[in-house]
Amino acid sequence: MASDPGLGRLQLGLAGAGNVAVCMVVGYGLALLLHAGAQGTVVFMLLSSVVAMIGTNALVDHRIRANAITAAYFPLAMGAGITAGTLLGPSQPASLVGFVVVMFLAVWMRRFGLGYFFYGFMLWNGYFFASFLKTTLPALPAMLVAIIVATAVVLLLSCTVFRRHPRRTLAAVFRSMSARQRGLARACIALLEADPGSPGADRASLAIFRARARATEAALMSDGWAAHAPALPEGWTASTLRARLLELQLGLDRLTLGTRQLAATDADPALRGPPWRPWARSPPRTPPAPAKPQRPSPSWRPPRPSACRQRPPTCTAASALSRRCRTGRC
């Protein structure tokens, strides 16, 4: 989890490999169905694999309708490039000028959004494909059919087998972010335990830099999923998630800055004591020593008994007046 936030790279790699493999098989079957021959079979398989690779990166939305709208323009973009390359192919000067124009259009249309980035990429790939293979006009309809079929296959796989669940993905990103934060804390502890200026301190400082970058990457991925309402936990909003992520980033900045200041060569040795480890077992507490009885001070004297205690019932009033009771008896 710490090396792949939300398992996004793993899922994207599996989706790319699966889409390319299935589209190549479908392209091979389409070539056999249309009796395209050996060269046509290779062309169909190459076209299908190119559409699969670009479509894997483009159709990553969890909404089926959004993916369908994006995939609807794949045949148009790649078909326009193949058509232009086929028409300008016989003339080399015109082909070179067209190559420059198509490259400019492919880059210029990126300003309209992420989807146009892939449309421009398909436009340029289609033109390069037709110019390199010297395709002819009779072979153009069959190639367009292969593009349409490959687009349909990629859309079907992206909306079924390789569809990503937003909330599960965001939860996996959160777990990865927690793992990276723990790695950053361990790197800070290693820097504090190392001697200033030693090779161990240099390695720990580099580890802090890498761990900080990895934690920032996970936070950016979480912020990217904040735009999808189904991915957020119950009761959360996109602004709440972004505020929490900002507070987390500021806290990590303070942690790394304070660690580097404490680990500096001119830092106070009293401040560079052993770091506090909440998980370490605390030493057993010694029982308190029994309290010693306090000796009375020399100036202290016991209270004197009263001059006359209560008379026993045998004493009479006359004897009490004639004698002084010293022992308590008359």
Image (cartoon, grey):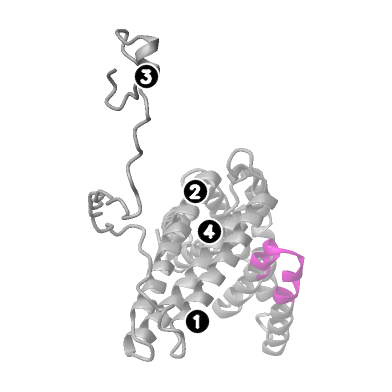
Mark-to-mark CA distance, 4 and 1: 46 Å
Q: Give me the C-alpha separation between circle 2 and circle 1.
A: 34 Å
Amino acid type of the residue that numbered disc 3 sits on in the rendered structure? Ser
The residue lying toward the viewer, choosing from 196 and 1, is 196
Q: Residue at x 61, y 44 (%)?
A: 64
Residue 258 in view here: yes
Choose the circle earlier in sequence order: 4 or 3.
4
- In the rendered image, residue 52, in percent from the top left (x then y), is placed at 51, 60
> Which residue type carries mark 2?
Ala
Residue type indicated by callout 1: Gln
Helix, strand or loop for the magenta stretch, by majority: helix
Q: Which residue is mark 3?
A: 322
Q: Earlier in the sequence, mark 4 or mark 2?
A: 4
Discs 4/1, front: 1
User: Element under label 4?
Assistant: helix
| The residue stretch that appears in magenta | 105-120
Whether residues under marks 2 and 3 lie with C-beta atoms below 8 angstroms apart, the answer is no
Tell me if mark 2 has few (under 14), some (14-19) or many (20+) residues whose alpha carbon lies within 10 angstroms of its own.
some
* Secondary-structure class at tag 2: helix
Q: How many numbered badges does the structure rendering display?
A: 4
Quadrant where the N terminus is found in the figure: bottom left
- Amino acid type at image mark 4: Thr
Q: Name the residue tied to disc 2.
A: 171
Would you name the residue on which mark 4 appears? 56
Reading the chain from its start, which is encountered first: label 4 or label 1? 4
- Look at the image and say whether residue 109 sits in the magenta stretch: yes
Residue under pointer 1: 261
- SS for tag 1? helix
Q: Nearer the viewer, mark 2 or mark 3?
A: 3
Above or below, comparing residue 31 to residue 324 in the picture: below
